[in-house]
Amino acid sequence: MPEGQGVFVAALANSRDATAADLLPSIRNLVAEMRRIGPRLHLPEDIPVAATILASLRHHRPLPPELWRRWAFPERAATVAD
């Protein structure tokens, strides 16, 4: 069983004086990399977000990262070329 996934975050390590505009590309790259290597959450549209949050609380589990990432960092819809 794998211990987990890791992503190199050196670009964010020395960023105390950086502005939000400076950090946003690095954060977007970090999220894209985590989506690439990490497990994905695919919830049916008919399950309320509140139910997922309550289930996480009830079972003492962290919220799935994609639960909040999908609003903070929406993925572009794939287009199909005819």
Image: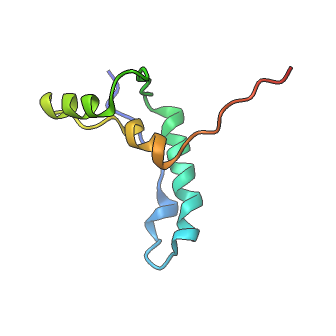
Residue 78 visible in the snapshot = yes
Q: Position of residue 6 (x, y in %)?
A: 42, 42
Residue 7 visible in the snapshot = no
Q: Residue furthest bottom?
A: 17
Quarter of the figure with the N terminus: top left
Q: Residue at x 83, y 24 (%)?
A: 81
Establish if 44 lies above or below 12.
Answer: above
Residue closest to the eye, 50 or 55: 50
Q: Determine whether, in the image, residue 13 is placed left or right of residue 75.
A: left
Q: Residue at x 32, y 33 (%)?
A: 49
The colour scheme used to paint the residues is rainbow
Q: Determine whether, in the image, residue 28 is placed left or right of residue 39.
A: right
Q: Position of residue 74 (x, y in %)?
A: 55, 43
Establish if 45 lies above or below 26.
Answer: above
Question: In which quarter of the view is residue 56 placed?
Answer: top left
Q: Position of residue 3 (x, y in %)?
A: 31, 31
Residue closest to the eye, 49 or 32: 49
